[in-house]
Image (cartoon, rainbow, N blue to C red):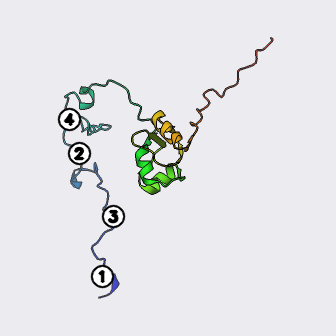
Amino acid sequence: MDLSHVHAGVTKRKGKKRVGRGIGSGHGKTASRGSKGQYASAGAKLFSSLFEGGQTPLFRRLPKRGFSHETWRNKYHIVNIGDVDRVFAAGERVDAASLKSKGLAKGAADGVRILGTGEVTKKLSIVANHVSKSAEEKVKAKGGSIEILPKPKLPVRNKMKPRKASND
């Protein structure tokens, strides 16, 4: 056996079906479109997968009410102060990276919120986007410190400078 016989009879690409080339071709006259009907003429498009045969489509039957903040809502890791006290040693810095390394915060988020459930038994240094009043009181009672991270700056809406009035 030599390499000239290995691919004999195997075509890499199937040839394009040439339609409308006379009756003798087998695909002549109506060019395999049948006689008359919606899809027999040129430019006819098949319906989309959402078409339900004239029945009102599902997306039009469902009520469209309300509003969603999901496009701009920030996702925060919410951690209770009791869990922080249980996992961290006295004097340690508690921030987003250390919470992830200790397993209290999983996945992606825009920041950290510390809530006041639980007790504080040691001095902690907390850096977060938000700390509840009860958590803040508990941490400060034990001599700990709290640093609130600043919110991101809002985008500048109007960058257009006002036109100078012409004195014509």
**Residue hosting label 3:** 13
Q: Nearer the viewer, mark 2 or mark 3?
A: 3
Where's the C terminus, which quadrant? top right
x, y percent for residue 27: 23, 51
Mark 2 and mark 3: Cα distance apart in space:
27 Å
The amino acid sitting under disc 3 is: Arg
Where's the N terminus, which quadrant? bottom left
Query: Which label belongs to residue 136?
Result: none
* Crowd band around label 4 with a 10 angstrom C-alpha radius: few (<14), some (14–19), many (20+): few
Q: Are marks 2 and 3 in contact (CB under 8 Å)?
A: no
Q: Earlier in the sequence, mark 1 or mark 2?
A: 1
The amino acid sitting under disc 4 is: Gly
The front one of 32 and 6 is: 6
In this rendering, the answer to whether 26 lies above or below 64 is below
Q: Are marks 1 and 4 in contact (CB under 8 Å)?
A: no
Q: Earlier in the sequence, mark 1 or mark 4?
A: 1
The amino acid sitting under disc 2 is: Lys
The front one of 95 and 123 is: 123
Mark 1 and mark 2: Cα distance apart in space:
40 Å
The front one of 25 and 145 is: 145
- Give the residue displayed 31% in from the left and 25% down from the top: 64
The amino acid sitting under disc 1 is: His
Secondary structure of the residue carrying numbered label 4: loop
Mark 1 and mark 4: Cα distance apart in space:
48 Å
Q: Earlier in the sequence, mark 3 or mark 1?
A: 1
